[in-house]
Amino acid sequence: VYADHRHAVAVSIPRDTLVTLPPCKLPDGKWTSTRPNTMFNEAYSVGQTAKGNPACTQNTVEKLTGLRVDHTVVVDFKGFAALTRVVGGVNVCLPQDVYEKDLNPNRATRGGLLFRKGEQKLSGQRALDYVRIRHGIGDGSDIGRIKRQQAFVASLVKKVKSDGLTPTGLLPLADAATKSLTVDPGLGTAKRLISFAMSLRNIDLHDTKFATIPWRYQGERVAIVQPDADQLWAALKADRTLDGTDAGGKKGGQTATAAASPGIATEVSGDGIDVAVYNGTTTRGLASRAATALTEHGFTVTGTANAVDRNRADTVIEYGAGLRTRAETVARLFPGAELNSVPGAGVDVVLGRSYAAKGGTSASPASTPTALPTSVARDARSADDDVCSNLSYG
């Protein structure tokens, strides 16, 4: 969601994308080591628990993009089906007839007809089957499935808006969401979900975009295309839409980036926040440089020292009970840093090699980003697009 609350974009990351998984916390409290060249979807399975590891996925996204993730929502199959029933179904479109074998390629025969070609309304299990179909449509790839999933979410947004974004109208949906989804504490009640949804009521359907990270095939996996991807992240940090529009909003003559661009240092005020800084690397003077940057933004640095572990790959911000919000403010100066709750801690910045690699510089005022690759805007979808268009890569 951009700072002007009149534009939004959802960026899909293919499940087979090769990324670097940062250290992630395990159920027993231990941490994994950095895992380069690993499929993106493996982040969610770190620890092998029934509930998955959304925190590891969030850390991976932040590491990959340099963007701070303010809220996390996890939708399982049961929850997805329930939400589609609450809204009364979602309009979708099939480019061809779809049979049971398309949903389950291990079947020996084609099986019965699941979906007829053309536009139709789906809910519950049938809606879930639609978004899971991969084989038998287009090129049969996960990339192609992403296109149809984006079309589905766009249609869902259109349906919710057409029903009216009012607290009364949203209550059944929000109530179902709190029962069906796994959300972070910031969105953990129906009231909070309604408040968040109402803050988006001025976003036009055409200004609600769906895009996919710039990608290419690398064998059976997906590789990120550079510098295209970094240009996309830079644009989002600077509150630039896919077509280059400035969506930062204005406040007192300055660009008001709010949560949409957490890495822009000119928007960070540390007034009243105490921070300790630790050097988790062997680079001399790193803590002092970070302390200077913090002081320049109004933070009170209570001290600097070397960390016990001097082999940190990434920067970590540790915080004690009740200090999450303050830690998030600090994190805006350290894009990609992980947040870690530690009993008894204040707010501590433990610097890693990623910070040293940047020359020990914190986030700085955003310059005008390099123009986005034309393919990103060209392949993007708007929530008001024809539901039968742009459904596959094949």
Image (cartoon, grey):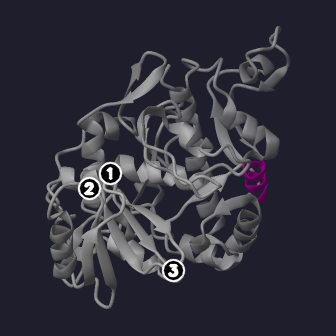
Q: Are marks 2 and 3 in contact (CB under 8 Å)?
A: no
119 relative position to 54: left or right: right
- Classify mark 1: residues with Cα within 10 Å, few (<14), some (14-19) or many (20+): some
Q: Is residue 269 visible?
A: no
152 relative position to 260: left or right: right
Name the residue beneath numbered marker 2: 281
Residue 103, x across and y down, in percent: 74, 24
Q: Are marks 3 and 1 in contact (CB under 8 Å)?
A: no
Q: Are marks 2 and 1 in contact (CB under 8 Å)?
A: yes
Is 82 within the magenta? Answer: yes
Give the vertical position of 155 relative to 19 (above or below): below
Kind of residue sitting beneath label 1: Asn
160 relative position to 147: left or right: right
Ranked by sequence position, the earlier of labels 3 and 1 is 1
Ranked by sequence position, the earlier of labels 2 and 3 is 2
Q: Which label number is shown at residue 311? A: 1
Find the distance from the CA under tag 2 to the CA under tag 1: 5 Å
Callout 1: helix, strand or loop?
loop
At 72% from the left and 38% from the top, the residue drawn is 120
Ranked by sequence position, the earlier of labels 2 and 1 is 2
Residue extent of the magenta highlight: 78-86
Name the residue beneath numbered marker 3: 344
Residue 394, x across and y down, in percent: 50, 19
User: Going by the picture, which residue comes out furthest to the front?
Assistant: 308
Residue 324, x across and y down, in percent: 48, 76
